[in-house]
Amino acid sequence: MTLAGRIPSTRWSLVVRAGKISGNAPDRQLARQSLEELCAIYWPALYGYLRRRGRSRQDAEDLIQGFFADLLKRDSISAADASRGRFRAFLYSSLDHYAANEHRRETAVKRGGNTSTFSIDAESFDSADRSFASDRIADHGTDPAVLFDRQWALCLIGQTIAELRTEYEAKGKGEWFAKLAPMLTETESDANSRTQLAADLGMSATALKVAIHRLRATYRARLLDAVAQTIENPDDSGRERQCLFDALGRHS
């Protein structure tokens, strides 16, 4: 049985396991796809880290695209052993090594190049740069590594909410989700706002309370699954989630 038959495709554990398999092209192709999907989700945390380390926007853009293109091209799956159990730790250390050993002229990647290039569009970089600017104002002087963990946690939250939004829109409940989604990240809400929300949705206060509770339960379960995608051992997902929420100054 292939790895594809045992675990979902977007899993760091799949990447790690496939790195130990020789001569199994289907498994290694699936693992490469999984690695590429994970990189596409979490690259903003690394971009912000480079910017906070003093890199210009252009340098950071070139380094990020060059780093991921190189990571995928040279098949680093074989280097992803169990000692690098967290995907964020693997990327963090790998990027530091890459940035320390490559000059900008060697790492610049032409956008829209061949299929080995990890391409990120300008609009995505604009969004990441706005996030960086906001964090820089709020956390001037904070260790870039600490802010990297915080941005990583925000990537996890954003991924989870986006997936839930897509599911509810497919059910024709996109507007319903849009109104309740703020409750997923807000710890408290005043009685008046909940009364108005219930009226907007045509629900009683009790029904709204139940709906929020159920949505939060689903959100927590999906968030834990998102964390599990980035670690080698699923048993460590609770600890990893708490670590990242500590970086946000919240409790999971």
Image (spheres, helix red, strand yellow):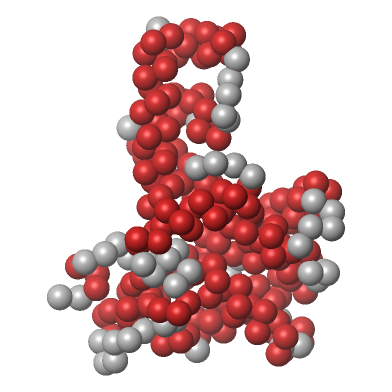
Q: In screen coordinates, is 235 left or right of 5? A: right
Q: In screen coordinates, is 115 left or right of 7? A: right
Q: Is residue 43 above or below residue 108?
A: above
* Front one among 62 and 244: 244
* Front one among 48 and 86: 86
Query: Which residue is painted at 59% across and 42% down in the image?
Result: 250
Image quadrant where residue 243 sits: bottom right
Residue 146 percent location from the top left of the image: 69, 60
Count of numbered marks: 0
Query: Which residue is painted at 75% across and 55% down in the image?
Result: 132
Residue 206 percent location from the top left of the image: 39, 10
Residue 112 visible? The answer is: no
Image quadrant where residue 148 sits: bottom right
Quarter the N terminus occupies: bottom left
Q: In this view, does 108 lie above or below 47?
A: below
Q: Is residue 250 above or below residue 62?
A: above
Q: In screen coordinates, is 7 left or right of 101? A: left
Query: Which residue is painted at 44% across and 14% down in the image?
Result: 201
Q: In screen coordinates, is 221 left or right of 111? A: left
